[in-house]
Amino acid sequence: MDGQASGKTERGGVKSVVALILSAGLAVPLSALPNTIIGPIVQANSPLNGEDLTDPVLAALEGGGGLPGEWVAEAGVGSAEISHLLARPELFGREVVILRAVRRNGDLERVEATFADAGSFFGYFDEKLPENLTRRQREEEVRRRLAVRQQEFATLYQESLAAVRGAVVSRADRQRPRTEKIGKGRMLRAEVEEWQVGELTLRLLAAEDRLVRLVIGKDLGEVWMDREFADEDDRERAARLKGSVKTDGESVRIEGLDPIPQGYRPYCGLNSLAMVARHLGLHLDEDWLAAAAGFRNTGSAAGSNMVRLYQAVASEAGLGMDRSSRFDEFTVRDALAEGRPVIVWRRYSPRRNRLHDRVAAGRAELPDPSSAEETASWPGEDAPLHASVLTGFDGDRNEVYFLESWTGRDRPRRMRFEEMAATAYLTFVFTE
């Protein structure tokens, strides 16, 4: 599953990573990942590439105008709109991997600059190996190349952290930072350093050898929950989520769910979770979730604790989490009707993916699930795993709607409930 062949390799070490890389390679073929965040940013021929935007960003946050450049919208949180800059500028003298802005009612609320991110650095480990090597030689070559890349990133991480911290200190009102803890649950809690520059708070988040990020704003808060929902009780949260549901006859859809494209990274399970987390009201993204889950710098999700991460996100949102290896259609329908998306880890097939592409585009219809030929085309036990977000269903057609981490925002895909039940490996239902 984008390297998340997870329930099977969550606790594996380097050996399982090497085996994963050498055996089937990727759970989802690279050709099936056309939509990215990092790709277009790197490829963008923007006049802002390499430009230091420190002063324009600080001025905009202080109320002195808008931000320069072309910004691309992604999944938001409540009334907070989130977008990223289609360029690779500098901030505080250091190149930015991705620059995000959070706006509310048109007003700029904060800016998030990521300077080092292991996910985009390692991507998928898919380097071509010489064909004349034995299996043991190939394993050794994979380990050698991984070790080189890991050392390169460790250097990048340390240099980025030192440079950003030093540049912030040079502008701060006081050199010594405050230390704060963000988040409620232990797994998602982040220890950060904060400085003041006038009315602005500059928050440095560093996840060792994974992530260096600077968040700048006037009121950053101490929890991941959006300030709009921070004080709501259980009844108010349930009403808010229920209010996101649109019903048309037997069709039920959760509106406002947008993918956060995963890019060239083994992050389908993370991006699916980040998509749902933002719908629930949490300002979380796939990069911090990867750090919290214990992702290793291998170009794979092997060794990470994804199941516990899902439970931690549910708890952070004030919800419970039911995980089951059995896909219960009625439980799923009930959750979707209440505005709570369902995440499914399912067996994946490029052939079925192409069919779902055509169905979503209106160029095909789903075949009769009672046909032996149709069921034979569904991915079986040996198929790789992939994560999808269920967003609704059509009771008349017995179809479930789902979103992927690489497809368009306005066109959920459709699958017969029979196929989803037959191919689901784990089902995650958020509960009140």
Image (tube, rainbow, N blue to C red):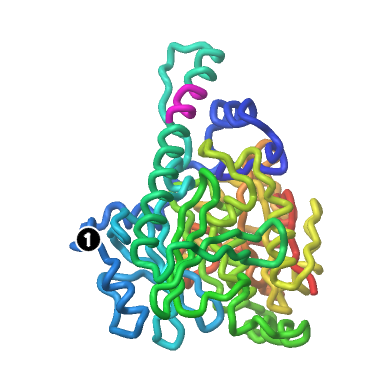
Position of 91 compared to 213: left or right?
A: left
Residue 156's place in the image compared with 206, above or below, is: above
Q: Where does the image place residue 205, in percent across and percent down from the top left?
A: 51, 58
Question: On the rendered image, what quadrant is the N terminus found in?
Answer: top right
- How many residues crowd mark 1 within 10 Å: few (<14), some (14–19), many (20+)? some
Q: Return the residue at label 1.
A: 51
Q: Where does the image place residue 309, in percent across and percent down from the top left?
A: 69, 55
Residue 234's place in the image compared with 4, above or below, is: below
Could you tell me if residue 377 is visible in this image?
A: no
By secondary structure, the bulk of the magenta-drawn segment is best described as helix
Residue at 32% over, 72% down: 57
Q: Where does the image place residue 242, in percent across and percent down from the top left?
A: 70, 83
Residue at 63% over, 64% down: 181
Q: Where does the image place residue 301, in percent across and percent down from the top left?
A: 59, 42
How many numbered badges does the structure rendering display?
1
Residue furthest left in the image? 47
- Residue nearest the observer in this picture, 389 or 305: 305
Question: On the rendered image, what quadrant is the C terminus found in?
Answer: bottom right
Confirm whether the magenta stretch covers residue 146.
Answer: yes
Residue range (magenta): 142-148
Confirm whether the magenta stretch covers residue 301.
Answer: no
- Residue nearest the observer in this picture, 5 or 372: 5
Position of 169 compared to 2: left or right?
A: left
